[in-house]
Image: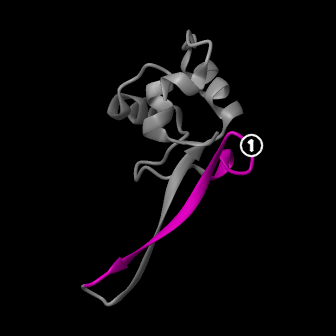
Amino acid sequence: MNRTLDQAAAVLGQKPRAFRQRLRALGILTQLGELACKYRDKGHLYIDTRQRWNPAIRGWSYYGVVMVTEQGIGWLAQQLGITVTHPNKDAAA
């Protein structure tokens, strides 16, 4: 099950804002909150492109959301030095 960063933070028992700050400090996220290039296509994190209708420009606006894969949860826990205590990760999210 793929999760957003906020959902991944909940599984790891972190506050979303502090979680993102730690990822920025490690260089996993850029200062703009985007996924750093060297962590793309590794199987842990990826960008999900989404769209929304923007009435101001009368057109679609596209944006990317950083997503965490199931194996990425364990990888992030290892990178951050967190022990995952939830036997069932799906119950935490």
Seen at 50% across and 66% down, the residue is 50
Q: How is the image coloured?
A: one colour
Seen at 75% across and 44% down, the residue is 42
Residue 70 as seen in the image, left or right of residue 60: right
Instruction: Find the residue positioned furthest to the right.
Output: 42
Q: Quadrant of residue 9?
A: top left
User: Could you say which is closer to the camera, residue 54 or residue 75?
Assistant: 54
Q: Position of residue 16 (x, y in %)?
A: 37, 33
Is residue 35 in the magenta section? no
Instruction: Look at label 1 and name its amino acid.
Output: Gly
Q: Position of residue 32 (x, y in %)?
A: 40, 53
Q: Quadrant of the N terminus?
A: top right
Residue 2 as seen in the image, left or right of residue 25: right
Q: Position of residue 13 (x, y in %)?
A: 44, 19
User: Could you say which is closer to the camera, residue 19 or residue 26?
Assistant: 19
Which segment did they paint magenta? 37-55
Report the residue marked by disc 1: 43
